[in-house]
Structures are given as structure tokens and as C-alpha cells.
Amino acid sequence: MQKNIVIVGAGFAGLYTAKYLEKRLKLLKSKKIEASIALIDQNNYFTFTPLLHEVASGGLERELILHPIREAFGTGVSFINSKVERVHLGKNFVMTSDKIQLPYDYLVLATGSVSSLKYDVLNTEIFKLKTVNDAYNIKSAILTVFERKQNSLLNPPIKVVIVGGGPTGVELVAELAEYMHGTLARLYKHVGPGQNQILLLNSAGHLLGSFDKRLGERIEKYLVQKLNVKVINNSKIISIEDFVIKSSNGEIRGADVIIDASGVRAMYPDLIPAIDTDEKNNIITDDFLRIPEYPNVYALGDVGQFYKLAQTAVNQAEYAAKSIVNLMLNKQPKQYTFKPKGFLLSLGKNYAIGSLFNVLIFGKPVWFLWRTIYLFKVLNSRHRIKIALNWTLNLFSDRDTTNI
Ligand SMILES: Cc1cc2nc3c(=O)[nH]c(=O)nc-3n(C[C@H](O)[C@H](O)[C@H](O)COP(=O)(O)OP(=O)(O)OC[C@H]3O[C@@H](n4cnc5c(N)ncnc54)[C@H](O)[C@@H]3O)c2cc1C
């Protein structure tokens, strides 16, 4: 009898689960497993998040980091472009906003996460960096302020504040610092010449608070000395009201653009029966990445309790695909284990830093390594070529300043 596999969310976890399942099921045709794979996403594109900060700072056009979901598969996966509103865990079906009802034998929940603010906000627009539209909105907000101040008689300087000294905040502040102090300073010569500020507020005692202190200190030194960023550690935000940022170590006034990169929390459809979650809203799973009360339901990627990283999501996708196929073959799946090999962060043009197999690495060669690794991870080969071309051009020319 045919088994129905339904995957909700086509991000790193969901899309790769579908890819791995399609591949495995093709190989197993001879064993006569009949299965259908339905992948559902509210968007019809996959977002390559590791390059979002380059869209926010005019380095890459937004389309280049997107990939049409339909083009990621052969005929083994049916894609449904719709939002899942209701998950009937006990009754084994999901319902979309278009009232499509999809029964399943195996369900993969991979709906990712959303930005979460941990402080009160009043009368202030706070930008975030989670989607391609968020990235574009940041670029647009900064360009709008430069344009406005260029036409003002006093030409006051610009102040951009980023909240969050984790990987996203650090990569974004580096790119924006280059954009503001480079391309935009040349184009808008009269705007606060030499006085424009970019600040990074970090709640921990050093950047990348949950990692090795040496790494955070080295990043801070590079940001301050080479990119002219002001880093304020031990700055826990209490509230932001009328663009005044109140934090544990004082107040910051006069911010023109405020961006929050302080964290994300798991997100899943509202209409789901009560499931166990931890204090951060992450779904609690068993040793096989399944929801304990519902052993035919997997929770992968950012909705779960593991490191919220693309590499974790892809690793879990491969595990879940293998596991589901094993269950269909009446074999017991193995327990899930994963240890990230390390990570790399780019700090603007020419410098990257990271840790590989617990060894601290940094400098220009690491930056080349970062670019090569990420380039090969971009799904769309056409976009891969265009990104490589863009990156090469960016070495010799200014970034894009179009504000649509
Ligand atoms: C700016 C930024 C930079 C990052 N850089 C890196 C990096 O360099 N390296 C790294 O390893 N990780 C990085 N990450 C983290 C990485 O992006 C996430 O860990 C990863 O995307 C998690 O994958 P996921 O599939 O769980 O969620 P996502 O990739 O977010 O995918 C979730 C999908 O579910 C869909 N969805 C949600 N709700 C519904 C619904 N109700 N119905 C239908 N569809 C739905 C969404 O549209 C989305 O397509 C970065 C994240 C950000 C924000």
C-alpha cells in the first residue's frame, strides 16, 4: 500500500528531507516501496539565509539568494504552495489555508523560526533579518535616511544600531559598516562626513557570547579597528521607545535605523494539538527526532532543540529521510547524533573567522574558504555563476544603491 509522506516547510530542513527521500526512494524502486512525497511551503522559493546580509548591504541582488522550490526536484516530489494552518496530529492530516486536506503516514514539521524581541518597543520601527524582504527593507531604510539627510541643510550624521552580538549581528554589522563608510560615504559626501556611526549592542561580556572568548575578542578588534564599528558589550536592552534605546548600561539616543539580530524562536502552525516544548518554545523530540507522543511525526531544523544552523537542519534532513525509509522497510532507525564540524563567519570584504574541528582560523584565506564553501552550497547553478561574478565585480566597484 502506498505511504504518504508530508513535509511542511521547504527551508533547509524540509527541502533537503524531500531531496534525500526522493533519492532514496528512487534507489529502492526494486524493493517495491510505494510512497508519495508532498512538500508544502507558504512561499514558492527557498531562501539561502547565509547570504542575507549581503542583500542588506547592496552586495547581492535579492533574487540571487532565492531558488524556485519546484526546480529543486524531479518528478518524485509534489510541491504545494500554500500555508499549513492546522495540523491534526492524532488524526494524521494537515489542512492548508486553501482548504487542501493532506493525509499522512509520516509527517515532517520543518517550519523554522521567527525573529523574537525580548524587550518592549514603543513608537519605533525595528528592522530584522530573517527573510529576503527583511534584508531588502534594511538596505532601503538606510538609503532612505542617507537621501533625507543629504537634502537637509545641517547634514547631520547617521547612526545605525544593531542589537545582538551573535553570528547574524556580527556578519551584518561588518557588511553594513563597509557599505556605510565606503560606498555610501562616497555617494553622499555631505552626510555627516566622517561622523556616521554604526553601533553593535551585545548583551554578553564578549561577542559570540556562547563561544570561545578569544574568538569574540578577535572579532571585536577587527570590527573596531578595521571597520570603524562601535561595540558595546554587557548591554542588555530593556526597552526601545521613540528611538531611545534603554539598556542595562545606559541610554542611546538619536538612532536613525535600529536592527534587531538578537535571536529567533521556533515557529509552527498555531492550530496544532498541545505538544511538549521547552522554555524557548522549541519542540521537544525523542532520540529519533520524533515527537514522543506521535512517533510518525518528525520535528527538524529550527523548530527543534538543536543549534539553529543550516548545517544542523541539512544533517537532520538526511537522518530523517533515512529513518523514514527504514521504517517503511520495517527496520529500526538508529538514534540521532550530530556534532557540528565548526563554523565560519565573514566580516565584510577580505576577512573571515571561524572554528574548524575546534581550531580557531581567521584572515583572508579563510574568507576565500568561506566564499567557496557557500558558493557551492547555493542550489541554483545559474545563480551560483552570477554570485561569483558579482563577488568579483564587488572587489573593484561600489555596491548597489538602488532603493526601489
Ligand atoms: C541572517 C541569517 C544568517 C544565517 N547564516 C547561517 C550560516 O551562515 N550558517 C548556518 O549554518 N546557518 C545560518 N543561519 C541559520 C539557518 O538559516 C537556519 O538554521 C535554517 O534556515 C533552519 O532551517 P529550517 O528548515 O528549520 O527553517 P527555514 O530555513 O527557516 O525554513 C522554514 C520554511 O518553512 C516555511 N513555513 C513556515 N511556516 C509555514 C506554514 N505554516 N506553512 C507552510 N510553510 C511554512 C517557511 O516559508 C520556510 O520556507 C542563518 C540565519 C539567518 C536568519
Image: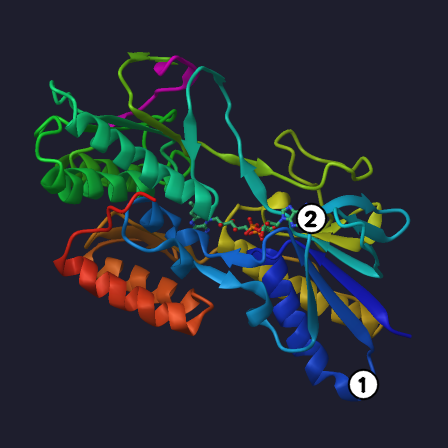
Amino acid at pointer 1: Lys
- Tell me if the residue at label 1 has its CB under 8 Å from ligand 1: no
Residue 335, above or below 159: below
Element class at badge 2: loop
Q: Residue drawn 44% across and 58% down?
A: 341
For this rendering, which residue is in front, 191 or 359?
A: 191
Question: Looking at the picture, which amino acid does disc 2 mark?
Answer: Lys
Magenta-span inclusion, residue 141 = no
Q: Is residue 349 left or right of residue 142?
A: left
Q: State whether the magenta stretch is mostly helix, strand or loop.
A: strand
User: Foreground: 274 or 206?
Assistant: 274
Magenta-tinted stretch: 230-245
Tell me the distance, in whole angstroms, between the alpha carbons under discs 1 and 2: 34 Å
Considering depth in this image, is 116 or 42 the residue closer to the camera? 42
Q: Nearer the viewer, residue 256 or 363?
A: 256
> Is any part of residue 338 visible from this angle?
no
Callout 1 crowding tier (Cα within 10 Å): few <14, some 14–19, many ≥20: few
- Quadrant location of residue 31? bottom right
The residue located at (53%, 58%) in the rendering is 46
Tell me, for residue 83, which label it has, or none. 2
Q: Give the label on residue 31, or none.
A: 1
Please state the horizontal and vertical placement of residue 179, each as a whole percent of the image: 21, 43
Is the shortest distance between ligand 1 and the CB of mark 2 under 8 Å? yes
